């Protein structure tokens, strides 16, 4: 929008189209340097993401235009930049072709934010907000017919209406360009705070301006005096703002109620899941206990070996048989059998997976036991 507005005004100067240069008959025209600075600033915003270096250079050019113009006002110089491209025939007072000092300040601030303070929100945000405040005063001055803000004086040029509006838009673009921080982080957030701030800003900013304009117009039409107009403005502002706040609060309340309902459902689901997990865990533990009892009471030897060939479980029968195989005294049932104790019971393949072994004879001092149908299986 800023780029298009600057181009339109520059075309108005090239083709001498009066309504492009000066849309309000009672106002002033936008100067050529102002249109050029707006074009550069708009291009800087457009190229900020894809061509950051070019964006910085364009921003510095905007700041340079503003600083040079302010220097002319402060030091009383004429640097010859005011009518460098076109002669200003619309000027009613010198210096002809020179932008307003407030406009020059805004360009110096916004150009610095575009060219130097990219990513440095602690610099860019105050500069953009200052430019927005200054240009907003000029815009409201046109709405309220404050002639001192838009009529040219003998020593300086006033701000054109479309200049003030485009600078406000440019300042918003600068605020929105950088990563959110501070107040902008709250406004741009996706939470309830961001939602409430955006809803309120759309009313809190234009509403006082509109109500103030209605009050001023009523006083100028002699419908009421200053006292009644002030009271009317206060009551209207309170009523409308209270309605807006109530609407936002209702929306936030509905959203929070839905969130609490979803949170309660999640807690209930989590409790149900924990109960099911506990039930399944208890069932598996009971089955493991039953299997352990069956294995311990079995007369056949049971040995569990992992993929690395390490013995990880056995039963009492395995302990007794291994001891008989080694012709030694039997250890306590809880003592782990060693690999040499059961070497006659199983054979392993090269991959470490147990395979059926041949029948083995085991003999103790008093008893001979023959192991038949010895087999192993891989448990996964």
Image (cartoon, rainbow, N blue to C red):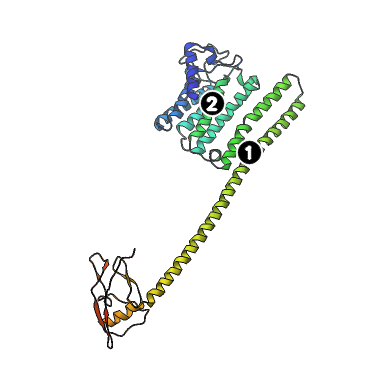
Neighbour class for label 2 at 10 Å: few (<14), some, many (≥20)? many
Q: Position of residue 177 (x, y in %)?
A: 48, 34
Look at 62% across and 21% down and name the residue there: 142
Depth check, front residue: 212 or 236:
236
Depth check, front residue: 201 or 53:
201
Q: Nearer the viewer, mark 2 or mark 1?
A: 1
Residue that badge 2 annotates? 167
Q: Position of residue 13 (x, y in %)?
A: 49, 14
Residue that badge 1 annotates? 248
| Residue 37 seen anywhere in this rendered image of the structure | no
Please indicate whether residue 63 sits to the left or right of residue 25 in the image: left
64 versus 314 height, above or below: above
Depth check, front residue: 268 or 20:
268
Depth check, front residue: 243 or 47:
243
Look at 48% across and 36% down and name the residue there: 178
Identify the mark nearer the N-term, 2 or 1.
2
Q: Position of residue 37 (x, y in %)?
A: 48, 23
Look at 57% across and 47% down and name the residue there: 259
Label 1 secondary element: helix
Dot 2 and dot 1 residues touching (CB under 8 Å): no
């Amino acid at each position: 929008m800023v780029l298009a507005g600057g181009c339109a005004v520059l075309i108005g100067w090239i083709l001498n189209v009066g309504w492009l240069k000066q849309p309000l008959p009672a106002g002033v025209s936008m100067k050529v340097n102002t249109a050029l600075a707006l074009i550069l600033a708009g291009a800087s915003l457009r190229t900020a993401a894809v061509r950051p270096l070019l964006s910085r250079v364009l921003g510095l050019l905007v700041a340079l235009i503003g600083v040079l113009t302010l220097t002319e006002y402060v030091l009383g110089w004429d640097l010859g930049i005011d009518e460098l491209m076109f002669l200003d025939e619309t000027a009613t007072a010198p210096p002809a072709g020179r932008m307003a000092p407030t406009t020059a300040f805004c360009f110096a601030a916004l150009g610095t934010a575009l060219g130097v303070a990219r990513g440095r929100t602690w610099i860019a945000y105050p500069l953009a907000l200052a430019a927005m405040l200054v240009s907003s005063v000029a815009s409201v001055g046109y709405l309220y017919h404050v002639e001192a803000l838009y009529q040219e004086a003998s020593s300086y040029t006033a701000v054109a209406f479309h200049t003030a509006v485009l600078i406000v838009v440019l300042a918003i673009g600068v605020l929105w360009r950088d990563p959110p921080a501070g107040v902008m982080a709250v406004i741009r957030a996706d939470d309830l705070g961001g939602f409430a701030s955006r809803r309120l800003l759309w009313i809190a900013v234009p509403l006082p301006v509109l109500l103030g304009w209605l009050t001023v117009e009523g006083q100028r039409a002699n419908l009421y005096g200053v006292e009644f107009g002030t009271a009317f403005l206060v009551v209207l502002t309170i009523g409308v703002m209270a309605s807006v706040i109530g609407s936002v609060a209702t929306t936030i309340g509905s959203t929070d109620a839905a969130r609490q309902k979803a949170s309660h459902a999640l807690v209930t689901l989590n409790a149900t899941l924990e109960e099911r997990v506990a039930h399944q865990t208890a069932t598996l533990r009971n089955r493991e206990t039953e299997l352990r009892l069956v294995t311990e009471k079995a007369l056949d030897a049971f040995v569990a070996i992992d993929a690395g060939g390490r013995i990880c479980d056995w039963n009492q029968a395995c302990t007794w048989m291994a001891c008989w195989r080694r012709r030694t005294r039997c250890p306590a049932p809880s003592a782990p059998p060693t690999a040499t104790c059961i070497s006659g019971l199983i054979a392993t393949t090269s991959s470490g997976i147990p395979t059926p072994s041949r029948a083995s004879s085991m003999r103790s001092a008093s008893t001979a036991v023959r192991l038949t149908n010895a087999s192993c299986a891989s448990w996964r």
